[in-house]
Amino acid sequence: MQGIQSAAEVTSWLVTGRELFLIIHILGVLCFAYIVAKRLVPLVRGQRDLRFDQPLLRVGRVLKFWLGQWKHPRYKTAGTIHILIFAGFILLAMRAFTVLIVGVSENFVMPGLSGTAGEIYNTITDYAATIVFLCMLIAVIRRLVFKPARYAVPARFGKAHTADAIFLLALIAILMVADSLFAAAKAAAQSQQGQPLEVLAVFSLPWMLQSALASTALPTLGRVYFGAYLLHEVTFYFLLCYRPFGIQFHVETSLFNVYFAKLDREILKPVRWGVSEEHLDQVKSFGVKTFEDFTWKHILDFYTCADCGRCSDNCPANAVGRPLSPRFITIKARDYAFQHYPMFGSSGNGKPLIGNIYSEDEIWSCTTCGACEAECPLLVEYIDKIVDLRRGMIDDGNVPQSLQKPLKAPESRGNPYGKMEKKKADWIKAKDFQQICNVKVVDGKNGADTLYFVDSITSFDDRMQSIGRATAKILNHIGESFGILGAAEKDSGHEVRRFGEETLFMALRDHNVDAIKASGVKRIVTADPHAYNALKHDYKDVPPVEHISQVIAKEVKAGNIKFNPVENPDSVYAYHDPCYLGRHNQIYDDPRDVLDAIPGLRRVEMKRSRDRSFCCGGGGLMLFYEPKEDQRMGVKRVQMAAEAGANVIVTACPFCMVNIEDAIKVAGMEGKMTAIDLAELVDKQIARESQTVA
Amino acid sequence: MEILVCARRVPDTSENEIQLNSAGDDIEREDLVYSINEADNYAVEEALQIVARVGGNVTVATVGGEDDEEILRREMAMGANHGVLITDDAFGSDGRGIATILKAFVQKGSYDLILTGVQAEDGGAQVGGMLAALLDYPFASLVNSIEVLDGKKLKISREIEGGNKEISEIDLPCVLSIQTGINEPRYVGMKGIRQVASIPIPTFGVSNLGLDPSAVGEAAAKVKKLDYFVPALGKGAEILHGSREENIDKVLELVAAKGGLK
């Protein structure tokens, strides 16, 4: 500091500057506080959301997802750039505060950053500022030249966001330049006056600027010094106050958004936080109808979205041209909030969201596959919002005609197909099957250790009954004492719930829980990932549940299941991760381990697999919905399998089977591609005692 | 506008496998699930939409037994203001008998508009017309749009075979039979039904409607069911066995031959 302070002009400027900067500080902070207070209004008006539990776990997640930028490397280029910028910001935070304080108290040094520590810190931050600056350049070039497709804004969602993005990037670049110029001017002046130098990091932005300013006259340097400081000050506060109006608000909100992010993603949000099921009858309106029906955390999600487009880039509904793009679920809500909660004047208009900012089809288009949530670096939640919006539509009676019967039939018949209860166990009566595998229907008298929970589609659909029989034969082969509930089993209600019919879901669940308890079984097995998810996460107080792929994997490992080698050497298998087995329950390896245990089985991975698996089109009630789309999800999926070089798609979900088999026909790939369920394949390949193991 | 919708509970064709009983005179009624007759549901939706536009009340009435209360609650959950169960052990006549009962009920109140479904899924599309005749009201059937003109008249339309539309004007009060497809009925969830579960539903019978039991009882029926049977299956679908291109040509030819292509 000594160098320039001794220069008379600069000193006198700084004296007047002290007052000027104090005023800017106070105005800037007040302005920011006012804006944030205004932004908090909708959060206060929003619904309750209980997110204050498990602080340690939440801090851990902040370290992983926020500080550790855990999800960013999933997009290599953008992720790397973001990690560099984020790290730069974190490193520069203290320097920025120091610089701000220096304006009013020129000898201020951040505690702990004097002497060598300070020099090291300055060197690091010189580079940090340089890297952030370069990243801004790269980001602008990406926006202008390379234009990644996921940043594009479809016409129906309004104008491109490019200008705003570049404006914000430019502001940060200016901030970096101003900061560097400030340091450079000071160092240049010190150098000219032969004073002890604050060494600038070689090849850093401040270092280069200092070289450029080396022969500049002292008075000019003083003005540059002051000008750079003023630019830094003004840009800093402008950015601070401008960020809450757009995508960069996440700089402030992301920490909170990650801290308060949902911990148990598999459990759907209750209709109302803090209202127990017994008291739900007293809740007049279900779900989200107006903006204020969102919870405060969901509104925080809207503020936090950085518009990176990764959700929609992975959304299967978006990929096939359905009206849904998760990115714009958020952006439209944020625009609504900004418009109806203005900085000045009255706020809120209470208009219904459906019909104004969202369309019905947009909300019904979601398969709840979870690809968006798996991708979001800021842990924005989508499924709960979609389900809440559906609850609102159901409550208003606003349901597509195609879904009305499948939503009514479970009430009267216990399944969406409207099939008679007494036919639920007909699949076990197939002649050639009953001879080799006699499945009992458990009740008070006929007990069993294990319940095979079949669920509606496998019970009633002619094609899917084959999965049921294969599952039963596997359980039989490993000597399991098992049975089914038969007519006493109603639909698991998994999709009923995800389509927003909470009351009907509760009735189905209560019926099934009673039936399961009455059967006296000790564990449950199912071959339907949707039923698995419902039993595991939506039901309470039922015995532990396993998916058949877990059972098979365990038995293979224990040596209780041995396989014959595959017959056709030309078969190349690809495993398709069902959303509710993979993404929602992290069962990725068991099915693959089983496949790899079959001798001679050639397996390839599709590009989109495991937690990036591409939804087949959706299960349960989604089979009845008539979406507006350019293409079927299943067709895209089948093409992905073909690209991977596979000619057999193995899945582990009856709904995937419906969609994929249909898609094979629609894509004209009959004869070139087949689909088989894991249970069917295992049943086919099991080396039974009468056979010799090859 | 005060609107009365006459509704009926029928076996749900999408959720039952209809079979003949052993006597062969009726369907096997054990293990059936019932719902509101589909066309009647459209009529209620239409009534609700009219009331939403011009104000008034919607009453849904059904002639039947205790079990039929279920559909009244469903329609009340939909938004109907009142449900009325018209029930009496003395009932048991034919379509004209039901029209007679409804006429007596209509005359108890004051309705500007009476809607029925175009026909019951297990019925003969007769009650609406007879009710209008008994009341000496104008009647229009197969209605697929309603516009309230000035409070005294309606502009209605019906579809003519072949897809054309006929627009008419009709004086109120009147009886209309409503075609499915006139609107998109709203969904009724379990929650809605629960919320109206405890609302008392008034019942009417022979005595408080001032009916002569002999006019509405079984003995008064002049139409009697003789038999009920499932027709033998006719020739099934034609399966095309050619290549894809041949099949497309054949399908086009068949559709054109039936007048489906112009």
Image: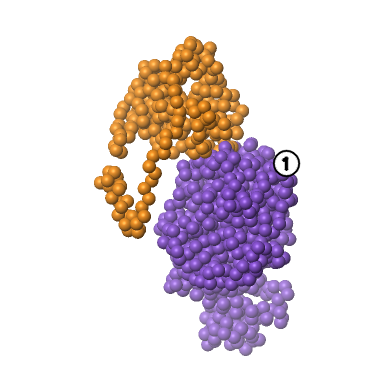
Chain colours: A purple, B orange
Residue that protrudes farthest toward the left in the picture = B262
Q: Is residue B118 left or right of residue A222?
A: left
Residue at horizontal 67 percent and vertical 38 percent from the top: A279
Query: Residue A682, located in which quarter of the rendered image?
Result: bottom right
Check the image and report above or below for B63 versus B234. Answer: above
Q: Position of residue A529 (x, y in %)?
A: 61, 55
Question: As drawn, which residue projects farthest toward the front?
Answer: A690
Residue with the mark numbered 1? A444
Which of the pair A486/A161 is nearer the observer? Answer: A486
Give the camera-side residue of A653 and B231.
B231
> Which quarter of the figure has residue A376?
bottom right
Residue in the picture at 60% in, 79% down: A126
- Give percent across and percent down for residue A572: 53, 70
Quarter occupied by residue B161: top left
Q: Given the image, on which type of amino acid does mark 1 rest?
A: Gly
Dot 1 crowding, Cα within 10 Å, few <14, some 14–19, many 20+: few
Q: Secondary structure at mark 1?
A: loop
